[in-house]
Amino acid sequence: MPTGAELFVDAAQRLGMSEIFTLVGDHLNEVLRVAARRGVRIIDFRHESGVTHAADAWARLKRKPALALVTGGPGHTNALTGIAAAKLIASPLIVVSGSRPRAMAERQAFQDLDQLNMVKPIVKWAAEPPSAAQIPFYLSRARAEALSGRMGPVYLNIPADTFLEVVEVPLRLPLPQPRQACWPDSRLVETALMMLKSSLQPVVIAGSGVWWADARAELHAFVEKTRLPIYTIGMARGVISDEHPQCFGYADPALNKAVRNVFREADLFLVLGKRIDYRLAFGGPRLFSPEAKFIQVDIHPPELGMNRDLDLGICADVKSTLAAMLEEMGDETWPELPWLEQLRQFRQQWESELLHIAEDSTLPIHPAAFYAEFKKLVPSEALFSWDGADFGHWGRAIIPARKPGGWLRLGPLGAIGSALPNSIALQLANPGKPVVLFTGDGSFGFYLSELDTMVRHSLPVVIIIGNDAAWGLERELQKAFHPSECPVACELRPTRYDVIMKGFGGEGENIHRREEIGPALQRAFSSRVPYLLNVHIRGARSPFTDWQISGKKKNRSVRGA
């Protein structure tokens, strides 16, 4: 007769989850022993938040549920940040916490917390199987909930004695059903095409819904037949390369100054799988003309028209909508609009501005100068995990997105530091491909011990730290709003992170001069171990931070009016 642990592992494998992201703890020993015997890949971390961040990244990259298993008490509370990140980014993460035995509930047991109610506000669904016999049913239900509608994280609380319980007759495992395509109304498709074809200055914004729907082929065909200009953001970065003739780069106005001009002048937007949220200035006049028309395609009904009145809302998945548009168009190919030449000029002006900044040869190294050197040598197939910090923001403005699934960001929670566990998932999901982590010295400190995880699992991530011995972005914000005062709590030490990397068993170099960058990158990319470049940079306010400052100043002036 099987135990609860055996039922759990068998159910996970039958549901297509062959990896467990975890950190060992007393509540988990039985299930981890069973998983190891059954050949499940166990990816063990040094901090539970690293566990859930990496599992979230794996779910995003694989477009399917990922399983994170953490112990109870502090293991559970540590995991909450990664769960919250998955909630805001709509990732189908399944988190299971162990807990005190059921017989010890409400008796002041060790590490006894109300874990279920603690997690409910940040997941789509949460439950505790009442017995070991029901574990398969509940795990299948968790998977179904994670994938329904707009995806998101789910949670199971499983007491330690439930894993040990012997079961005579387990409840059946409901087998997963394929995620159904959500097709658009054909009349809405016809209307959308008529609006786009009659527009003189249209723009397509492609967001993460394009990635989740696996709509790469349809998106390429659509932009090549309509010859419309497209900007990408979120997980859509790289789905259509920035080097494609119809793609004009990042849709983020904080990092692509050309976008600010383009979006203000455009007369129609087709927004594909992208929330009209803070990143797009909530659809407001800071970024868009009040007269501009909007067509939004989203699988989640409440998203349509939430922050911006729509001229047309299509509740459907992006892949089905693009396929319907292509079918409606038939063999027709639209002529290129004169508008695209203006967009090319805007892009050239912005790239020239960045290039001018990157020509700075003084020391310490300007972040833009570093990325100019990096851009010359980066392998074309490289995949990137981006953290917060001004250093990373300079890179996101300069480096093009070329590969689908190769531009991993923190998401709306902005949990700085999580790019390190994200990079672990990125390398695990793409063995043999070069993976680069960009982070600042402040962000790097959050999950520094996961360097050990990289080394133990033989993951040759190239880690690049922009080291300005400061919380640089916060320092710039304080200086902008309080120029007569010294920044508070922003200074760090110029730590030798390359030495720390070597202590964990990887390799690293310390870089002070621009001419050192190229040879160091070549050594890093040819290495078979995690390789850290500790780049001493100048604190320099990025375009991202300038955008934040200008917005805050505008809000302050409005409130004071």
Image (cartoon, grey):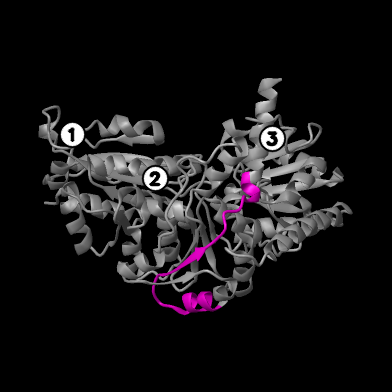
Rendered view: 437 above or below 445: below
The residue indicated by pointer 2 is 82
Whole-percent x, y for residue 39 in the image: 25, 65
Distance from the alpha carbon under mark 3 to that under mark 2: 28 Å
Whole-percent x, y for residue 252 in the image: 65, 47
Q: Residues within 10 Å of mark 3 (few under 14, many from 20)?
A: many
The answer to which image quadrant residue 400 occupies is: bottom right
The residue indicated by pointer 3 is 283
The residue located at (80%, 57%) in the rendering is: 349
Secondary structure under tag 2 reads: helix
The residue located at (34%, 52%) in the rendering is: 51
Front residue (pair 339, 300): 339
Front residue (pair 461, 510): 510
Q: Earlier in the sequence, mark 3 or mark 1?
A: 1
The residue located at (58%, 47%) in the rendering is: 209
Rendered view: 123 above or below 42: above
Residue 400 as seen in the image, left or right of residue 109: right
Distance from the alpha carbon under mark 3 to that under mark 1: 45 Å
